Image (spheres, coloured by chain):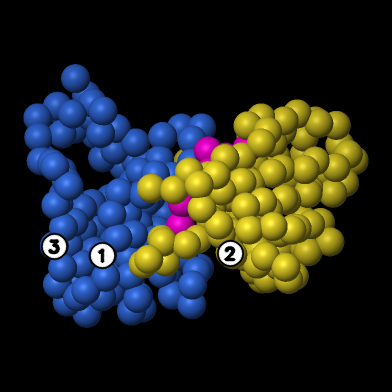
Amino acid sequence: TQLLEQSPQFLSIQEGENLTVYCNSSSVFSSLQWYRQEPGEGPVLLVTVVTGGEVKKLKRLTFQFGDARKDSSLHITAAQPGDTGLYLCAGEGDYKLSFGAGTTVTVRA
Amino acid sequence: GAVVSQHPSRVICKSGTSVKIECRSLDFQATTMFWYRQFPKKSLMLMATSNEGSKATYEQGVEKDKFLINHASLTLSTLTVTSAHPEDSSFYICSAGGGALNEQFFGPGTRLTVL
């Protein structure tokens, strides 16, 4: 059973458009991490959010952690083809990560 | 972030043979490593938590005698798939824990194909 639900499952947009990926749970997590994975590679850590209500920016990526530490979102501004990949959120609890099902993002040139 | 390597990156074996996958943390010491399995276009499923110097903790439904884990040092954990069968074909990924916020740093994965 997935503790984290990600939406949408697939997202295909044109270069320059914005996108948002959501990660929701009924559980409270100590922290939440976002990863990006390309085919045949391992996930690469993008950000870790810890505090409820926290907002972190990483160039064109903005990450929010919900006030109750149960949900998070990833917003990409002016997406580029290089942003294409599988985006995974993962909640940390009991020193383990529980992953969402992932959102496959395709940015068309 | 920390660097984690896996070897081999790809392996093809015959049914019934055993395959060992190595996971190394290259620039830090990891008391805890994790092994995941990932099916095509699916998320990562935690198989087991590997603790240096002690027995691994397996997730429910994962056969410990099938997937042998050894964490002999702070920089190396191994996963051995014993008597592999075609249904064991998958992408196996390890990670090393140790970030200040309990982040995990992932290896590049190993593609196992059992014929």
Is the Cβ of the residue at disc 2 closer than 8 Å to that at disc 1?
Answer: no
Residue B69, percent from left and from top: 74, 58
Q: Secondary structure at mark 3?
A: strand
- Tag 3, which chain? A
Q: Label 3: how many residues lie within 10 Å, few (<14), some (14-19) or many (20+)?
A: some
Q: Identify the residue position indicated by label 2 in the image.
A: B32
First to last magenta residue range: B104-110
Q: Residue at x 35, y 76 (%)?
A: A30
**Which quarter of the image is occupied by the C terminus of chain B?**
top right
- Tag 2, which chain? B
Residue B81, percent from left and from top: 78, 48
The answer to if A105 sits in the magenta stretch is: no
Q: Amino acid at mark 3?
A: Val
Give the label on residue A4, or none: none
Q: Amino acid at mark 2?
A: Thr
Give the label on residue A49, or none: 1
Q: Which chain is yellow?
A: B
Residue A50, percent from left and from top: 26, 70
In this view, the mark in front (2 or 1): 2
Answer left or right for B95 relative to A8.
Answer: right
Q: Identify the residue position indicated by label 3 in the image.
A: A55
- How far is mark 3 from mark 1, CA to CA? 8 Å
